[in-house]
Amino acid sequence: MAKNDAKAQDYRAERKERLAKNAKKASKKTFDSTKLASTVISVLLVLVVVALAVFLVFKLEVPHRLLPALEVNGRTYTVAEYSYFYNSVSNTYFNSNSSIKLTDKIDDGEDGQISYADLFKKQTLESIESSNYYLAKCEEEGVVLSAEHEQELSEIVSQIQTYADQYRYSFSRYVSLAYGKGLTEKVFKQLLTEQLLVAQYVENLESKCYAEITDEELESAYAEDPAAYQSVDIRLFGFEVPADEKTTETETETTTTADETTTAEGETTEETTVAEEETTVAETVEKDPTETELLAKEMLDRITDEDSFMDLAYEYAEEEDKETFKDGSATLAKSIKKSVVETNIGSNVAEWLYAEDRATGDKNMFTTDDYVYVIYIIKPMYRNEEALVDARHILVSFDEVAATLGAAEGNTVDTEKKDDVEVETALTEEELEITNEGTGYSIELVTEAYKQARDIYDKYMSGEKTEDSFAALAEEYSADTGSIGEQTAGGGLYESIERGKMVEPFENWVYEEGRKAGDVDLVMTNYGWHIMYFVKQHDEPAWKTDVRAALGAEKFEALSEELTEEISGSGEEKAFFGFAVAELEKTIKKNSAAASSHDGHDH
């Protein structure tokens, strides 16, 4: 029994040890499983964090600021920078036609019909290559931004900040939305500065092309084609052709010609030519004159001199147009160039006007699709030796004053425009006698307009009295949309004023003998009161200005083509070029779809 007891004890001890080992092993296995689960969870968390980080990176447009899209002469342009140039190009087209689709075709000139998508890529590349080239020239020649362009830069940045504040965006966020994903304030300002520097360099390059033209070159170009640079002064009146008279069809007769062909035997036979030798002869059928042509012929026959032309223009004018033709300015066309006549009336009219045997008093009539014109020559071809002038003005319009007063409560001023208004005079506070003659408005309204003009004049005289301060007042107060705003020279400026291009009182003031830079005055025309500012008289006569403009344009165009050829091909697409283009095209399609949806909803 003792022996068996001992064995039992040994077995129990062995089992205990074995269980202990198994327990320990089981414990270790449990620990490893926990560790594995923990590891998996950690990896998943890391993946989530990475995914979130990637999402935020793209959301914050970091790749656009870092990834290379294009390289030009060693400079890498990021996706964001490429977007800036691309948007500048594409917006030029979308601003004039918002319905453009990327798949639409356009005639590119060089490559024929290409899609807008390809056109935008092509022109963006050219723009970046050109910018890079001229920036290198600026650095090489030490060109820096002028004070004028520094001011322009400041104004643009200030305007963008205003827009950003309006929409409660940071500057960087606004430019990234408006000009390209990934753009920051710093990058945008750098690109804008470079853009203005390039524009300045090109402007100076163009000016140099014009300035370097010699007098000998001007005289030589004039001698080659005098008619292109000579002027005529005429009276012109047009009878509008009604729709039922606008028939332009002609009868035609098709004929075939017979060629004489010599055979091998020397015999001559007649052989009808094939289709390529078939000739179509158009014969204009003589038609009876239309009622409009008869009316124009009646006026033509009654013209005896320039005064009679003006009287007859008023007589034949439609009732609603008679006020326009009350004075002679409506029919007067001075310093007219041949090219202008060819473009706006017709080549046959130009040939007649610029014939060498034309003389003062010659008259004629011409029928076009829309008008039958009656023309009287005041002064036949001549070379304009008078220097051109530049001037600024601020217009206080009679029409606008009348509209404002008419809408004002308690107004007692007669604001109605009349053909038969009584001509009166009045004395201003400055003891200046003024009249309402030729305005169509009452003397009270003309006086009120004068007071407003005088207030602006006094503001100028009590201020800095500089051209810039005058220009600022023009932008604020002038009613003349032809000389204020972004689409004009701005600040009320008219450059290269030639006689016959402005209303007579305006023209008489700027051409008055002894006029000098900085002269300011009040002048009344039938449009309203003008606060005038004389800028300068040009150094050369008008004809030289015309020839210089033509030759300068030719020289600059030739230089531009030469430089374009030199610059072309300097750009190289980088790894993320396709990404940049895809992002931009996606945005365009999205905006286009949104616009179409909005239009459909409106309708």
Image (cartoon, rainbow, N blue to C red):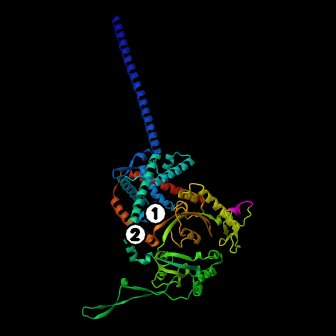
Q: Which label sits in the foreground, 2 or 1?
A: 2
* Residue 532 lies in the magenta-colored region: no
Residue 559 placed where, x, y %?
36, 64
Q: Which residue is mark 1?
A: 104
- What's the residue at 49%, 54% (across, down)? 152
Instruction: Categorize mark 2 by other alpha carbons within 10 Å: few (<14), some (14-19), many (20+).
Output: some
- What's the residue at 54%, 46% (across, down)? 169
Please state, as top left, top right, bottom left or bottom right, where the C terminus lies in the image.
Answer: bottom right
Disc marking residue 456: none
- What's the residue at 60%, 83% (across, down)? 308
Q: For residue 28, which quarter of the picture?
A: top left
What amino acid is labelled 2 in the image? Leu
Q: For residue 203, which quarter of the picture?
A: bottom left
Q: Earlier in the sequence, mark 2 or mark 1?
A: 1
Per the picture, the main secondary structure of the magenta-coloured stretch is helix
Query: Quick one: which residue is furthest to the bottom in this view?
Result: 267
Drawn side of residue 413 relative to residue 202, left or right = right
Q: Which residues are magenta?
A: 403-410
Q: Which residue is mark 2?
A: 551
Residue 371 placed where, x, y %?
55, 79
